[in-house]
Amino acid sequence: MSTNVDYLIDSQDPHHPANLICALCKQFFDLNWCTGTGGGISIKHPQTGHLYVAPSGVQKERMKPQDMFVVDGKNYEYLRIPPGLKPSACTPLFNACYKFKSAGAIVHTHSLNAVTCSLIFGQEFRIKGVEQIKAIPSTRKDPSTGKVLNLNWDDTCVIPIIENRPHEDQLEDPLMGIFEKYPHTCAVIVRRHGIFVWGPTIEKAKVLNEALDYLMELAVKMHQMGIPPDCNVGEESKYVSKH
Amino acid sequence: MSTNVDYLIDSQDPHHPANLICALCKQFFDLNWCTGTGGGISIKHPQTGHLYVAPSGVQKERMKPQDMFVVDGKNYEYLRIPPGLKPSACTPLFNACYKFKSAGAIVHTHSLNAVTCSLIFGQEFRIKGVEQIKAIPSTRKDPSTGKVLNLNWDDTCVIPIIENRPHEDQLEDPLMGIFEKYPHTCAVIVRRHGIFVWGPTIEKAKVLNEALDYLMELAVKMHQMGIPPDCNVGEESKYVSKH
Amino acid sequence: MSTNVDYLIDSQDPHHPANLICALCKQFFDLNWCTGTGGGISIKHPQTGHLYVAPSGVQKERMKPQDMFVVDGKNYEYLRIPPGLKPSACTPLFNACYKFKSAGAIVHTHSLNAVTCSLIFGQEFRIKGVEQIKAIPSTRKDPSTGKVLNLNWDDTCVIPIIENRPHEDQLEDPLMGIFEKYPHTCAVIVRRHGIFVWGPTIEKAKVLNEALDYLMELAVKMHQMGIPPDCNVGEESKYVSKH
Amino acid sequence: MSTNVDYLIDSQDPHHPANLICALCKQFFDLNWCTGTGGGISIKHPQTGHLYVAPSGVQKERMKPQDMFVVDGKNYEYLRIPPGLKPSACTPLFNACYKFKSAGAIVHTHSLNAVTCSLIFGQEFRIKGVEQIKAIPSTRKDPSTGKVLNLNWDDTCVIPIIENRPHEDQLEDPLMGIFEKYPHTCAVIVRRHGIFVWGPTIEKAKVLNEALDYLMELAVKMHQMGIPPDCNVGEESKYVSKH
């Protein structure tokens, strides 16, 4: 590996993974999703299949394309290591999503909504009967096209929760367990830690993360008002005396 | 229809509907009103009468004028369909507001304040005795000019709530019912979904939406403190021991 | 009055009142202090003594210098009326602050912290023992210089609350009553409406408004936790079992 | 001292302390960490060792490099005094951190999360079992390199709390007491006032401050839900009935 691999991260295109990771991390920083160097994003280059990963322990709102690690999408070997930086401890988890979920991108945040939900839910985050749920994939497929269908608004959105571990790479086994037990899930919450969300493209992963964060924020509000977030539509009036 | 209809969305004027929808959706995105591709805006061109509509399922903060659908304001036929995009599922609702409420613009958000209010209120959102209420139209007209008067600050602001349906176009009938039962309302809350707000111009619709979101945020705070949002002015001390 | 009075609002200096009112209203809009056309700012030109006032009923984040009213600082007659706009209903209140409090600027917001505090406090907003209180003027003067001293951190900050009225100009009499009863106050809260804050310069008025909004936000949090905001330092442990 | 010392604050480099203090104070202002002229930042120039300090009583989001005080890093004498400005009352505290903690920068905020935590905690802020804790230094050293190790995620993060005093320079003695009793701490909370955070560089101090503010925000949420922030991992279910 030599410095001439900088062509891998040198692009004028704002949608190039090396540029987009920086722009989105700044946006996520402003949402308190990756302050204190927490969180991260990885994107697979749609053409080359290379995997771009933000480094560990840096200010996420001040990253530059030159800070990016690049990994070969087939053998998972490093194609580019930015000088003086350490790879994200999430790299094995990102790679598992690429390998087993055909992910095109993974978003990892330390969202306080995710952490708070992990304190008030057991093995699964569950919320039911909210329009925004329609943004989340279901376990159903369109019989004619075979495409995965999204949830209906009055379905229950279920996101599995795993326990945190001392080192992020130790989350790989529990993550694999989730892949097996919840083959259709697009996300996993790590208790007292945050959330991982993946999708076929970075646009999809970003939108899923936004929709889930909105749903988790709402679930916390419902919990505070005494309404179980997964109660049936209309049953909220059992728990709150309506005005 | 051919690509030469792009003149419909090509303007240097920041107030042109094709530009303004993009600018306002970015502003609304930052307020968590249309994250996860939710929500939308439609504006009638004040001169041509054409209806501009944001597409479905796209990142609302990254839209461009080229992404806009344009609908004929008289026969509701498409004048421009952006390649590869689907029209908003809200289009029939927007059209109903244009047709029956003489709307100049409609704002639709997934505001968490609206969703939360829909959980703590029954058939109507009600709040009374707040200065900001003066921004909302009343059922009264100025006897000399015939113009609709706004609410007084100590009036009760009433916004009807309808139940959500599996598909947004199924909300058209309930919306028509609201037009009949609440002929003066400028908005309808959809339970566990969000809010639709209309006005004679986009400036008015935007201001009404801001005022209502402020009032809904306040109503949630009052509910949390145990004060009925529509209690009489001064009666809040029955519900909270004042300092 | 003719259009050639536009020299009154035409300046390249960002600190010129016509420019600064626009910049600050945009900043305040983003803080939800003047959404829905609510709130406003007035600044006395430090050299000419002219009074600049934002118009009524406009989007406060999109104002331009051309939208400003200009009032003679001595006889309170209009020097400039922007075409098609109405003067702020707060103008008499602003003028009273100029006349009787030697104000250099007045900030008026619909802050939800102010409205919420007006629901949990009676005749006075009171908070005690917070560092930020040192930003607020006291009733004491420096014996050697005669300058008004600020509060000590363990003093009680007291801001009077008046009842709202149907029209803003009807608040003038209660405001005059406050000037008499609380000669040292730099602000008055209007119940279920918002707050007015004045100071010798716009910088001072802005800083006072920020400090008071911070204190009101804290008071709401303390109320929610069961701690009287004006309890003595150390007595909070009577009300909350500390970790 | 003459005006020709302006070379000390005149640099095109955005990382120069005189520029960086201004940029970060603007960023912190937007987070409500230094509104109302509260809070401040001091940075030691990595090459010259000079200490840069923001002035007292100014709008923190509108500072310019010309407003900076510069202090000799060895004898603590002023090298540059900006005309018409007063040095920060925190200067003795900043200097103590430089002298006794080998700090490279100190961040001081009036964060409402810090103030709120100071109301619900006694002598120490304590939180346990959150991934973000891994950003905070521990009392352990790497046996091979001698470098201070960070906390494990399931360790308890402990930040000492001192009582506020009438004048900020009176906090110097209690701060020295903390240096002795908690030799490894990177921060101290001042009750009903805010927080001081230091680090070997401004990047480190900023990241530590972000991580601590996140943890304090979470602790307030946990307190509101009835969960002791320093309970053992898994014991939260004793305090909240999980969904």
Image (cartoon, coloured by chain):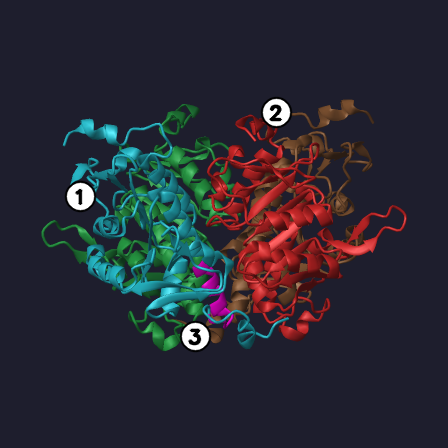
Chain colours: A red, B brown, C green, D cyan
Which SS class for mark 1? Answer: loop
Query: Does the magenta-highlighted stretch encompass residue D220?
Result: yes
User: What residue is rendered at 65% in x and 58% in y?
Assistant: A173
Q: Are marks 1 and 2 in contact (CB under 8 Å)?
A: no
Looking at the image, is mark 3 or mark 2 earlier in the sequence?
A: 2
Picture quarter with the N terminus of chain C:
top left
User: What residue is rendered at 56% in x and 68% in y?
Assistant: A224
Identify the amino acid type marked 3.
Ser
Q: Residues within 10 Å of mark 2 (few under 14, many from 20)?
A: few
With A160 as the anchor, is C35 left or right in this view?
left
What residue is pinned by disc 3?
B241
Give the extent of the magenta segment.
D215-228
Q: Residues within 10 Å of mark 1 (few under 14, many from 20)?
A: some
Identify the amino acid type marked 1.
Tyr
- The answer for how far apart the CA atoms under marks 1 and 2 are is 57 Å
What residue is pinned by disc 1?
D76
Identify the amino acid type marked 2.
Gln
Vertical placement of residue C17 versus C12, above or below: below
> Do we see residue B24 in this rendering?
yes
